[in-house]
Image (spheres, rainbow, N blue to C red):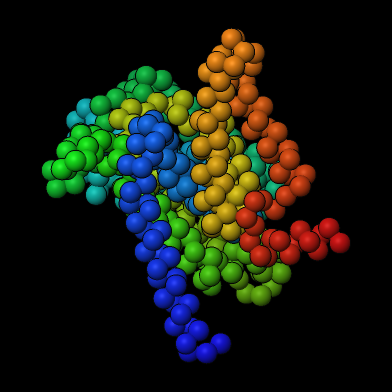
C-alpha cells in the first residue's frame, strides 16, 4: 500500500465519520417528521439497550460467563439515582454525582455476584445469576417495611430529570424553527453515553485485558497455565459489565421519572441476552445491531393490529401475541441458520466454521 493510498483511505474514513455524525445529529428530528415522536422515544430506549447489551457482552461475549441476572445491575443504577433524586428522601443530588455513584454501586454488586461464582460456568452460573436477579427484584419489592426505603411495589415517582446548566431535559424548548421536546434532548445525552460505551468496548476488546477474557472464554485452565490471574480477570469482567448497567439504569430513571420493581424482571434480562446473541456475541458492532433490531421490531409489530383491522375488518391475531411469536420464531431461525449471530466476530466465526467441519 502506497502513502497515497493510505492518505486516501484516511480521508475517506474521515468523510464517512463526518457524514455519520451529521446523520445522527439530525436523526431525531427526521424521525419525528416522518414517523412521529413516539419513534424518537423508541430510539432513546434503543440507545439505553445498546449500553446494556454492550455491558452484558463484556461478561458473556468476551469472558464467556453466562449471566441471566444482568438486569439487577440496571435496577441498582436506577434505584440509586431515584432514591437520591426524588422526594423519597428529599435529597435531590446532581446527576453528575448520581450517575457515577450508580455505576460504582453496580460495579460493587457485580463483584459481590462474581466472587462466590468464580468456579461456576455454563448452566450452573446461569442459575446462580438468575437467582441473584430475582433476589434484587424481590428486595426492591419488599423494602418498604418496617422502614420505607424503596416504596415497595408502588415504585418511586417524581424523579428529577437531568439538568445541565439550568437546562432541564424534561421541558420543551424552541430554538428558531425547531421544537426540542424532552425525547429530543434525552436522545443526545443517550447518544453520547452510547458512543462512549462503544468506544470503551472497542478499546477493551483490543486490550490486554480483552485478550485475557477471550483466553478464559476459550479455555480457562490453559489461560491459568499461561499466567493469567483468572480470578481477578473474571471479577473485572463482572464489575465492568455491571458498570455499564448502572449508568444505563440512572439514565433510565431520569428519563422515565418513575421506576418500580416491575421494570426489572427476568424477561428483561433474557431480552438483553437475546440482543447479544442475535447481534453476534463478542462483536461490539454486532451487539449494537442486535440491540437496535430487538428494540424496534416489537414496536413495529404493534402496527399489525391496525393493519388487520383496515384490511380484513377485524383483528385475527392479537399484536402482543404476534410479537412474542415473531420474536420466538426469529430466535429459532437464528440458532438454526446463523448460530454465531447476524454480525459475529472473526474469532467466533472461525470457531463455528471449525465446529461445523
User: Can residue 328 be seen by looking at this rendering?
Assistant: yes
Q: Relative to the observer, which residue lies in front, 143 or 53?
A: 53
Which residue is outermost to the front? Answer: 311
The residue shown at (55%, 15%) is 310
Going 27% across and 36% down the picture, which residue do you hit? 182
The image quadrant where one finds the N terminus is bottom right
Q: Nearer the viewer, residue 305 or 275?
A: 305
Question: What percent of the width, then of the height, locates residue 312?
Answer: 62, 13
**Residue lying at the far right of the rendered structure:** 357
Question: On the rendered image, what quadrant is the C terminus found in?
Answer: bottom right
Camera sees residue 143: no
Q: Residue at x 42, y 45 (%)?
A: 47
Instruction: Check the image and name the residue furthest to the left.
Output: 166
Q: Is residue 3 left or right of residue 119?
A: left
Q: Residue at left 30%, top 30%?
A: 257
In percent of width and height, residue 220 lies at 68, 63
Total numbered labels: 0
Task: Tell me the quarter of the picture where residue 254 sits.
Answer: top left
Is residue 93 shown left or right of residue 212? left
Pinpoint residue 97: horizontal percent, then vertical percent. Answer: 25, 48
Outermost residue toward the bottom in this view: 2
Rendered view: 307 above or below 43 = above
**Residue 165, image x and y in percent?**
14, 47
Q: Is residue 26 left or right of residue 224?
A: left
Amino acid at each position: 500500500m502506497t502513502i497515497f493510498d493510505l492518505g486516501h483511505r484516511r480521508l475517506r474514513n474521515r468523510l464517512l465519520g463526518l457524514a455519520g455524525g451529521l446523520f445522527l445529529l439530525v436523526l431525531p428530528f427526521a424521525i419525528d417528521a416522518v414517523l412521529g415522536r413516539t419513534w424518537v422515544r423508541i430510539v432513546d430506549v434503543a440507545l439505553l439497550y445498546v449500553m446494556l447489551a454492550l455491558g452484558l457482552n463484556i461478561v458473556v461475549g468476551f469472558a464467556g460467563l453466562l449471566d441471566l441476572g444482568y438486569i439487577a445491575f440496571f435496577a441498582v443504577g436506577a434505584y440509586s439515582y431515584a432514591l437520591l433524586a426524588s422526594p423519597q428522601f428529599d435529597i435531590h443530588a446532581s446527576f453528575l454525582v448520581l450517575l457515577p455513584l450508580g455505576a460504582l454501586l453496580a460495579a460493587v454488586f457485580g463483584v459481590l455476584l462474581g466472587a462466590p461464582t468464580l468456579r461456576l460456568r455454563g448452566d450452573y452460573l446461569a442459575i446462580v445469576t438468575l437467582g441473584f436477579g430475582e433476589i434484587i427484584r424481590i428486595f426492591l419489592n419488599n423494602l418498604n417495611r418496617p422502614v420505607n426505603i424503596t416504596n415497595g411495589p408502588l415504585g418511586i415517582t417524581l424523579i428529577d430529570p437531568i439538568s445541565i446548566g439550568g437546562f432541564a431535559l424534561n421541558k420543551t424548548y424552541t430554538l428558531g424553527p425547531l421544537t426540542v421536546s424532552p425525547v429530543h434532548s434525552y436522545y443526545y445525552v443517550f447518544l453520547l453515553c452510547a458512543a462512549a460505551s462503544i468506544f470503551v468496548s472497542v478499546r477493551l476488546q483490543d486490550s490486554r485485558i480483552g485478550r485475557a477474557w477471550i483466553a478464559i472464554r476459550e479455555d480457562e485452565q490453559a489461560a491459568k497455565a499461561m499466567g493469567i490471574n483468572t480470578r481477578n480477570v473474571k471479577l473485572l469482567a463482572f464489575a465492568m459489565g455491571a458498570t455499564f448497567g448502572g449508568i444505563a439504569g440512572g439514565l433510565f430513571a431520569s428519563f422515565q421519572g418513575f421506576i418500580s420493581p416491575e421494570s426489572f424482571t427476568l424477561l428483561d434480562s433474557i431480552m438483553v441476552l437475546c440482543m447479544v446473541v442475535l447481534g453476534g456475541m463478542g462483536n461490539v458492532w454486532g451487539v449494537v445491531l442486535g440491540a437496535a433490531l430487538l428494540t424496534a421490531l416489537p414496536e413495529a409489530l404493534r402496527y399489525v393490529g391496525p393493519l388487520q383491522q383496515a384490511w380484513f375488518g377485524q383483528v385475527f391475531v392479537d399484536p402482543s401475541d404476534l410479537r412474542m411469536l415473531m420474536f420466538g420464531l426469529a430466535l429459532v431461525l437464528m440458532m438454526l441458520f446463523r448460530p454465531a449471530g447476524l454480525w459475529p466476530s472473526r474469532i467466533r466465526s472461525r470457531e463455528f466454521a471449525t465446529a461445523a467441519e
